[in-house]
Amino acid sequence: MLRHTLDAEPGLDVVGVATDGESAVAMAAEKNPDAVIMDIELPGEMDGIDAALKIKERRLDTGIVILSVHKDRRYVSSLPLSETPGWAYLLKQNVPDMASVLRAIQGSVDGMVVLDPEVVESLQPKRGSPAARLTPRHRQVLELIAQGFNNTTIAQRLTLTEKSVETYINAIYQVLQIPGEEGVHSRVKATLVYLEDS
């Protein structure tokens, strides 16, 4: 079903469907896709995370969208989000929301970390952590960043100007102590710190 829905999307071409981890790795090596949508639980020797890691070993810039039934933070934390760019984690029950799927695909291809809205909403910063010092508005903005939204869409959703969103984002970076390092995408780092602090 997902294949047919994605095939109908302009600009997307489904180049293959695999039934297990081994065939997914082989197909990705042959087809060189920009992104791979992978079930976390696959039959056979290799689960979805292991298969995704093998795909990333061959071509680091392949975006990976993991589909899971698990909302628990520890499943998200099992992904090497800070080590390799371009991951998304979506709950299977939310796959019918094609906008979320498309954001996850695009975000993973762009080297971002994109999390399912329900996963993001379930995160509660630990007491004393940098993320616990975020204001409610900072958290709203950061939660939308973690879901893969750009500044324009965040501004529209929160009825703010883009300049206000930029100001909030800069404040979030300061609170979370995110340096403007070369090669480290600040939005990814902010999402990872929020995940680690929850």
Image (cartoon, rainbow, N blue to C red):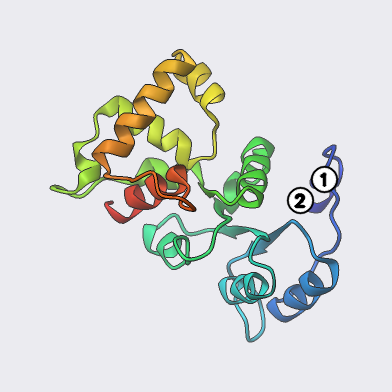
- The kind of residue on which mark 2 rests is Leu
Locate residue 148: give its quadrant: top right
Label 2 crowd (10 A; few <14 / some 14-19 / many >=20):
few
Task: Indicate left or right for 197 with 151 as reference.
Answer: left
Task: Indicate left or right for 181 with 48 as reference.
Answer: left
Mark 1 residue element:
loop
- The kind of residue on which mark 1 rests is Leu
Residue at image coords 40%, 63%: 77
Label 1 crowd (10 A; few <14 / some 14-19 / many >=20):
few
Task: Indicate left or right for 1 with 116 as reference.
Answer: right
Mark 2 = which residue?
2
Q: Is residue 53 visible?
A: yes
Residue at image coords 66%, 35%: 99
Q: Could you tell me residue 72's position as x and y percent? A: 39, 58
Q: Which mark is residue 12?
A: 1
Q: Could you tell me residue 36's position as x and y percent? A: 71, 60
Query: Of marks 1 and 2, which one's residue comes earlier in the chain?
Result: 2
Q: Is the Cβ of the residue at disc 1 closer than 8 Å to that at disc 2? A: no
Q: Nearer the observer, disc 1 or disc 2?
A: 1
- Number of numbered discs: 2
